Amino acid sequence: MNNQAVTLIFGEVLFDCFPDGNSVLGGAPFNVAWHLQAFGLLPLMITRVGDDELGEQVQSAMRDWNMDTDGVQQDAEHPTGTVDIEFEDGEPRYTIVEHRAYDYIDAGSLPSSSEGSLLYHGSLALRKKTSREALTKLKQDHTGSIFMDVNLRDPWWQRESVLALADDADWVKLNEDELAQLGSRAGDIRSQAREFIEAHGLKGLVVTLGANGAIALTDDGDISEVKPSQTLRVVDTVGAGDAFTSVLILGLTKAWPLDQTMQRAQEFASLMVGQQGATVHDQNFYRAQIADWDL
C-alpha cells in the first residue's frame, strides 16, 4: 500500500441467493466500497471470503472494477457469505447464513492503516468474536475518523454492543426505526438525534427517513434535511441506503459542507433507485456526478 490516506471499509461481502439459482454480489460494506471506487476514492475493502467459487467471484469482480484486494482474506474452513432468499405470498424472506468467512476476519492479517484515513464499518460482520477482535485491532491502529453504518439485522445484534460501537464512532448513520430502538423515543426526530449525539460524543448523526429523505445533525448545531423528488422513478430501492452512505463518506473525506454532502447523497441515491440491484457495473453511470462534483 502507498502512504496516502485511504478509506478503510470493514465488513461483510456476501451473495443474495435466490430460489431460481441466481446469486447477486453485495453486502452493505461491499456496495459502499464499490461506489467509492467508481468516484475515485480508492477504498480498501477489509473482509474475508471462502476458498471457493463465490470467493473467487468476489475477487474477480473487484479486480475488474480496479479495486484493491489486499484487504481480502481467504478462509479455507468457512465459505463465502450468503443470504438465502425465499418468497412467501410474493414477499421475500431473508436468512443470513451463519458461520461464513466474514465472521472470521483475522486480526493478525490486517493491512496497515494510513494516517488521516476514514474507517467505515457496520454491525452484521461483528456477530462473531473473531471479527469483533479484528475491528478492535483496526481501531487501535487507526488515526482517522470512524463512520458507523448501523444496519441492524435481526437476530444478529445486541443493543449494548451496538451502543458501545457508537461510543467509538465520530459519525453514525441509521434509520428512524433504528434510532427508536437504540436511543430515546421521546420527542421528535431532531430531539432524539440530538440526544443520541450527546450520549455518544458524536461529531454527526444521519437519520434516513425512507420516502421522506434524511436529516443530518452535527455536534456544533448544523442541521440539513433532504427529500427525494415526488416524481422519482423507482425500479429497485435495495441499493439506495448504501448509495447514500457512499456519498456521505465522499463528502466527509472531501470536506464538503454538510448541506452539499446531503444534497449530493440524495441525488445519487435517487439515481440508484432507478437501477436494478445495489451496484452498477458501468463506469459511465457515474460520469455526470464525477463531472458535476469536480472529482
Image (cartoon, helix red, strand yellow):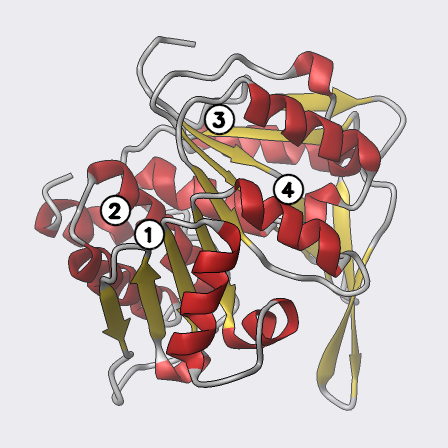
What residue is disc 2 on? Answer: 251
Q: CA distance from mark 2 to mark 3?
A: 25 Å
Q: CA distance from mark 4 to mark 1?
A: 20 Å
Q: Residues within 10 Å of mark 1 (few under 14, many from 20)?
A: many
Q: Which quadrant holds residue 76?
A: top right
Q: Amino acid at mark 4?
A: Val
Residue 284 locus on image (x, y percent): 25, 48
Q: Quadrant of the N terminus?
A: top left
Q: Residue at x 87, y 41 (%)?
A: 99
What residue is disc 3 on? Answer: 63
Q: CA distance from mark 3 to mark 4?
A: 15 Å
Q: Earlier in the sequence, mark 3 or mark 4?
A: 4
Q: Earlier in the sequence, mark 2 or mark 4?
A: 4
Of tags 2 and 3, the one toward the viewer is: 2
Q: CA distance from mark 2 to mark 4?
A: 24 Å
Q: CA distance from mark 1 to mark 3?
A: 25 Å
Of tags 1 and 3, the one toward the viewer is: 1
What residue is disc 1 on? Answer: 248
Residue 71 visible? The answer is no
Looking at the rendered structure, the secondary structure element under dot 3 is helix
